[in-house]
Image (cartoon, coloured by chain):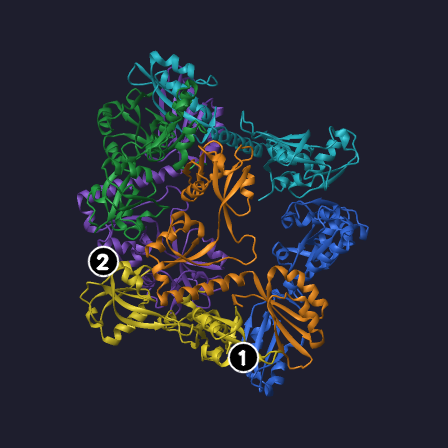
Chain colours: A purple, B cyan, C green, D blue, E orange, F yellow
Amino acid sequence: MVRAQEMARYVQSGALDAGITGHDWVVETGADVDELAELVYAKQRLARVRWVLAVPEDSAIREPCNLEGKTIATEVVQLTRQYLARFGVNARVEFSWGATEVKVPQLADAIVEVTETGSSLRANRLRIVDTVLESATVFIMNRSSASDAWKREKAENLILMLKGAIDAASKVGLLLNVRRDDLAAVLQVLPALKNPTISNLSDPDWVAVNTIIEEAVVRQLLPKLKAAKAQGIVEYPLNKIVL
Amino acid sequence: MVRAQEMARYVQSGALDAGITGHDWVVETGADVDELAELVYAKQRLARVRWVLAVPEDSAIREPCNLEGKTIATEVVQLTRQYLARFGVNARVEFSWGATEVKVPQLADAIVEVTETGSSLRANRLRIVDTVLESATVFIMNRSSASDAWKREKAENLILMLKGAIDAASKVGLLLNVRRDDLAAVLQVLPALKNPTISNLSDPDWVAVNTIIEEAVVRQLLPKLKAAKAQGIVEYPLNKIVL
Amino acid sequence: MVRAQEMARYVQSGALDAGITGHDWVVETGADVDELAELVYAKQRLARVRWVLAVPEDSAIREPCNLEGKTIATEVVQLTRQYLARFGVNARVEFSWGATEVKVPQLADAIVEVTETGSSLRANRLRIVDTVLESATVFIMNRSSASDAWKREKAENLILMLKGAIDAASKVGLLLNVRRDDLAAVLQVLPALKNPTISNLSDPDWVAVNTIIEEAVVRQLLPKLKAAKAQGIVEYPLNKIVL
Amino acid sequence: MVRAQEMARYVQSGALDAGITGHDWVVETGADVDELAELVYAKQRLARVRWVLAVPEDSAIREPCNLEGKTIATEVVQLTRQYLARFGVNARVEFSWGATEVKVPQLADAIVEVTETGSSLRANRLRIVDTVLESATVFIMNRSSASDAWKREKAENLILMLKGAIDAASKVGLLLNVRRDDLAAVLQVLPALKNPTISNLSDPDWVAVNTIIEEAVVRQLLPKLKAAKAQGIVEYPLNKIVL
Amino acid sequence: MVRAQEMARYVQSGALDAGITGHDWVVETGADVDELAELVYAKQRLARVRWVLAVPEDSAIREPCNLEGKTIATEVVQLTRQYLARFGVNARVEFSWGATEVKVPQLADAIVEVTETGSSLRANRLRIVDTVLESATVFIMNRSSASDAWKREKAENLILMLKGAIDAASKVGLLLNVRRDDLAAVLQVLPALKNPTISNLSDPDWVAVNTIIEEAVVRQLLPKLKAAKAQGIVEYPLNKIVL
Amino acid sequence: MVRAQEMARYVQSGALDAGITGHDWVVETGADVDELAELVYAKQRLARVRWVLAVPEDSAIREPCNLEGKTIATEVVQLTRQYLARFGVNARVEFSWGATEVKVPQLADAIVEVTETGSSLRANRLRIVDTVLESATVFIMNRSSASDAWKREKAENLILMLKGAIDAASKVGLLLNVRRDDLAAVLQVLPALKNPTISNLSDPDWVAVNTIIEEAVVRQLLPKLKAAKAQGIVEYPLNKIVL
């Protein structure tokens, strides 16, 4: 197993043709690889992580330029140096093995740390000054492998599979029967994103409706579908979807 | 997390708008709450539990009136007192922390204990004298919250969801193809509860049948469906159903 | 619970009407039972195990007749004796409690051991001389029970269920919509084994295709189906299939 | 196994001759038993627990008499009632299944809860109003068994053993050699509690000192003993001590 | 690691110079090895195990000769055959993989099984007919290695160590001070097995007593020693003893 | 908890007065702290670890100067740079997150890795070129704290305790009785390191010998002591020793 931190180096060197890692580590290691796709849950607030510059709540540091001459502890030394360079700031950047939050103010004036919701930072009484980098999970490929047609196609198929599984993880299938007369009312309740599949039943007065929806909205939909006279409503699990 | 024993008190006090607990604990705590729905598996022998009055196999106690002046150990002191009051019996009711079965005859003459099948009581050589209370899992709501239209609707939706999931837990979907000529024979095999969904296939001689059945009967149905010339029989899992 | 090694004896004796064990143990114990069915994954390289005669890489033993006067360690003493008898070879066969591979050359000249891929033998620097017996999981039945019509039918139904679940374990359902004009192209992509179910949709220009495929080929199929203009492709899990 | 809460009842009934439980549960259950000995670590701040009356930090309740007409949640209903009676206060006492701290102020105005250091109460922003009962672990005996000479002697022996093991748990043996000329200086360093054992060595100029000390003071003693010219200092573990 | 069942074969073959196994497996495998020492706890009821012939409680089999023509299930096939030969009895002996107790009466008429206390046999409603072999843990040595002086000495040293540790496992050290005038009374209380070590203290009126005793008798001794005016009684753990 | 890698920084900054870490991390982080003591097992082959420069077995790199222009992967970037500087070699040093062994030859030409016995390196077919640094566990102290008399004394006491416990870990106490006539023979057998404690027994013909020895030599000593007529030999465990 290769660590996320080192995957980009393995792929750049050709030891591996492709890999999955964070965009942050591609930048941190300066690896020259091809980022073919982002692998993120659509419309999800946890989709991305941020590396942020944080300081103690009562610190006088309010913006990047206040860092001049200060010490910053972080696991991403290169990312932090590039960030400081953008502002022309000179500061000491120290590599930190885990648990960076507890190092301020005694070992460092500021930290650059990864966060999803900021709650761990708040629990440590830290204040976010700025976002250094937004990052998501990416599928990366060795540049030479990426220009090999056969390998590229295999990689694209794999990405299609992975995205299909990611998309399916938060969705479910919904199957129901409804009289033709009530179909319009039922369809009005269903999310408009994609047309549901409507199939004829033996009994010409009825149709079956099959659709894919976010699992999170089932709770709102079920009572409305029942009110719209849908019958035999069945929610079933999905493995993958490619809409 | 709130214990089942205390949920009714939390809901009565308004600390929570609604909760799930046993009907027994609603009665034991004397909480004034609205029992909106029972959440039980249909046609299941484990659907309900019973609080029973039990005595050692060789005890002289044969009916409630024999309890006069005796000692009863139980976790449900109020339930037991209400039960005794019904018969005008005076007896000492002692609260018991777990493992009530081992307390007779040395610490108590009788116990009031919960049981599903009675096997634990039999293993302890106890005889059931009477049923004190039958109880099922219930969805309870604070009376004031229950008369708030918006909260009440949210509660009803949640109950619909929970019942949909409970109903689905013991059921599966069954999908099969059959020639129109053999459809009647296949339908005769399927349980009569709900009409299955019959849909037209491209080949006008064939139809597809989609139905929901108890998982427990699949074993009996599969050979019969095959004998009735069903083809491509597929059993698939369900998340929720609202028939 | 009954061990695989002893199941055939239990079934022969009538202590059990039927059981599941390896064909190897039926032969080793010499049990007179009815092998009603093999329970194996179709087209799977792990479907069967082999009991092989193995010797140290540098042993002079090249064929069964070289075993004359030698010592063989094995868990299957009877199987090994029957094998030697076939070649008219006299050798000492010693029962071995587990870990037979480490017993050559100090405690034995050869071993008879079970293997799927041979990798454990290679890791112990052993060379396979011959296959003594191929074995698969079998459903066995007491001969007298097997001639009882009612018991036989229950056994056959159980076999149908088990095979249905085994077949489903490596397969998934695939559902997609396609314009009638593109149907031929889509069908050409799908495996030819079984005709997929094609159903009419409300929109007369479209049909839905429902089919069962090996999960292992989904990776190859998804991009091709997309290229053939299939839409709303959904992969869903299966419990059992009887095609 | 018998729960601490119910041990006193078992011993009172004669189901057990003797047992170990908390003094609090003897009082709560009103059991008439003989408390033969307290089993506590000498000079230990954790030796005893306290049941305290506690209220939310901002509660108006300042003393027991403020409880008139209030609701108190507790696991020790009888203890609490006896406490209230002492002050002539009428209040509703409700049995609480665990986690009493979270019940104020919504389900109760005050609680009676057990505490060692009070830290859990502070963490829940509760204020201690009064101590209801101090309690320690006690060895209890059935009154009739306690007057049986043979049983009583066995119980006294057991108590001696238990106290010996409890006393040993926090102590260690210390063995050292010292010249007779330096003995006085070494003895001055050792705790004065018990005279250490001083034995003659073959070399008439030297003696050996063997003593039992609290493990917690070894850290302070070792450097001082070395400074006082003790040699060959050895700390060894103990199982039991009866000084 | 070598299994107990196969150790004797490894030692006989010279693959190992020496090993520890049960005497039973030496006999069962017919291995020609030197049993240098038994490794058993002195005066311990668990010191030895027995292989016994057992039958269902209601079996007509009362003595070995009743086994003629019967089937016996056992893990020790050779031991059982040798036992039957002693009585000139012909019976079928079947190797059994574990859980032999459950095989009677359906798969066998009798079993030969290992037991310490017989409780597992009783729990399975089996009756012991006869003891087939008593067995203890033994230290075995390859005959050729045992006649090599250097190897033999190392083995004897190892046996001394092992016995020293086994003897120490159930014993403890006891150290106490006593006035010379009370010494006789104290010594009378101590077990007579080995003379305790009595050493002079600086104070000529006092002596120290150091002795090794069974941990199981500490409970009886402590009160008596105290009564005999022993002081500063300390029980300490032991690693090994060679008395 | 502070990681070994960062302890020296915490101590240098004064966040902690003292700590325990490896000498290697003191050097790597360049922390200016006082190394008060090494905490190592005397005469133990595992006492120290080595950071070594290693290359693939078949690499052309034979000495440090061959590294010119090469890439080196390591967790100790500064240590490695200082080492290269000593030889005036220019090479690229890359930080490696764990599992450095697997990075040659694809991601690096050489590695600097920690090793105790070299076995992990050999298992990865690596050859050691040179030792970069030897390191042991050290007790470090903040320079300012170390010159505070009170803190310094507490630190020295703690070191005495730690060394006492480390020394005791591999040692045991040995107690035996011997006739005065045989004392010389017994003393000759005991290691000469420290004079054992010889005490007079009540019986003037006997003495008791108490000594501390390495547990590893007990096996050799026991038979010799017995041969020299020592009696009542007892081995007992130690917690700490300060000889």
Q: Secondary structure at mark 2?
A: loop
Q: Earlier in the sequence, mark 2 or mark 1?
A: 2
Camera-side mark, 2 or 1: 1
Residue at x 32%, y 52% (from the top left corner): A1
Residue at x 28%, y 60% (from the top left corner): F123
Q: Nearer the viewer, residue B141 or C222?
A: C222
Q: Is residue A77 left or right of residue D37?
A: left
| Residue C56 image position (x, y, % from top left) | 24, 50
| Residue A35 image position (x, y, % from top left) | 27, 49
State the image quarter where residue F82 is shown.
bottom left
Q: Is residue C129 left or right of residue B99?
A: left
Q: Nearer the viewer, residue A186 or C60?
A: C60
Q: Secondary structure at mark 1?
A: strand
Which residue corresponds to mark 2? F106
Task: Give amino acid for label 2.
Answer: Gln
User: Marks 2 and 1, Cα distance to the nearest angstrom?
Assistant: 62 Å
Query: Looking at the picture, does residue C149 appear above or below residue B138?
Result: above
| Residue A92 shows up from this direction | no
Task: Give amino acid for label 1.
Answer: Thr
Q: Is residue D125 left or right of residue C132?
A: right
Query: Looking at the picture, does residue E40 appear above or below residue C6?
Result: below
Estimate how packed mark 2 is, as few (under 14), some (14 to 19) or many (20 or more) residues with alpha carbons within 10 Å.
Answer: few
Query: Looking at the picture, does residue C162 appear above or below residue A144?
Result: above
Query: Looking at the picture, does residue C230 appear above or below residue C91?
Result: above
Which residue corresponds to mark 1? F197
Q: Nearer the viewer, residue B21 or C29?
A: C29
State the image quarter where residue A81 is shown.
bottom left
Q: What chain does mark 2 sit on?
A: F
